[in-house]
Amino acid sequence: MICVIDYGIGNLRSAQKAFEYIGANSLLTSDATLIKQARGLVLPGVGSFGRTMDALIKTGTCDLLKERIEAGVPFLGICIGFQMLFETSDESPSSRGLGVLGGNVEVLSPKVKRPQMQWNRVEVERDDSILFRNMDPSPWMYFVHSYAPSPTDLRSIVARCNYGEDIVCAIEQENIFGVQFHPEKSGPAGITLLRNFVDKVSG
């Protein structure tokens, strides 16, 4: 079972529906017992870094998610869920992220329109990527964001996109996966990426 974490902000159901579409056993929940039993975890969402972190903390699942990640459970962060994996964000300087990945989430260049709300080409940089297996090396994905992570460990980066500058848009580090774009809104390429994560969970 894959648990899509429900913390009450944004259309979290759309991500869970995408997993249903590909036939994965998935559930939108904040129930601690189910999260402990899950073979895979997904943290999607839209909104500000501080507000979403506050909402996650209020559900009581923040420490549990870190515990399950440390236990090796495959974890996928999507959009703000990706950003929440990091330590800090320019958007909410007083808020702390989950901190399971080193780095800060930085505002996009002032030279471009914010947010980036468009389809953009993703350039895959690692041949051993799990998320981008059996995909074009430059797939189109759909983005909605004004901030993007700057990871401390550059080895975790698997893909970037260009939006006035090179932006990190996907990472893989052991059992931790994260994407800045919305695979559930990205057509066949996004669905393939979600299938690849499910295959990882199924092991």
Image: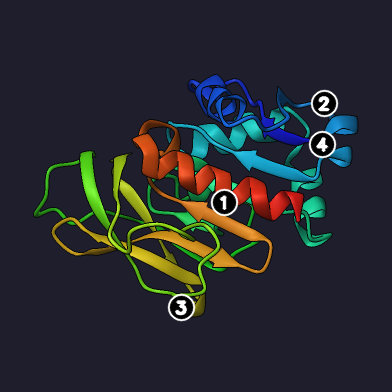
Q: CA distance from mark 2 to mark 1?
A: 25 Å
Asked if labels 3 and 4 touch by Cβ distance under 8 angstroms, the answer is no
Q: Horizontal and vertical percent for residue 64? A: 81, 44
Q: Which residue is mark 3?
A: 154
Q: Are marks 1 and 4 in contact (CB under 8 Å)?
A: no
Task: Locate the N terminus by quadrant.
Answer: top right
Density class for disc 4 (Cα within 10 Å; few <14, some 14-19, many ≥20) is many
Residue 199 is at least partly visible in this image: yes
The location of residue 89, given as percent across then percent down, is 44, 53
Q: Horizontally, is 137 left or right of 192 in the view?
A: left
Instruction: Identify residue for label 1.
Output: 196
Question: How far is the residue under mark 1 from the one under mark 3?
Answer: 22 Å
* Quarter of the figure with residue 136: bottom left
**Vertical position of residue 55 compared to residue 41: above or below:** above
The residue identified by callout 4 is 35
Residue drawn at (65%, 45%) of the image: 198
Q: Earlier in the sequence, mark 1 or mark 4?
A: 4
Q: Amino acid at mark 4?
A: Ile
- Cβ atoms at labels 2 and 4 below 8 Å apart: yes
How far is mark 3 from mark 2, CA to CA? 34 Å
Give the residue type at disc 1: Asn
**Pointer 3 with pointer 2, Cβ within 8 A:** no
Query: Farthest residue toward the front?
Result: 134
**Relative horizontal placement of residue 109, taking residue 1 as reference (left or right):** left
Point out the image quarter for the C terminus: bottom right
Q: Secondary structure at mark 4?
A: helix
Q: Image point 48% across, 22% down: which residue?
A: 10
Q: Which dot marks residue 31?
A: 2
- For badge 3, the amino acid type reads Leu
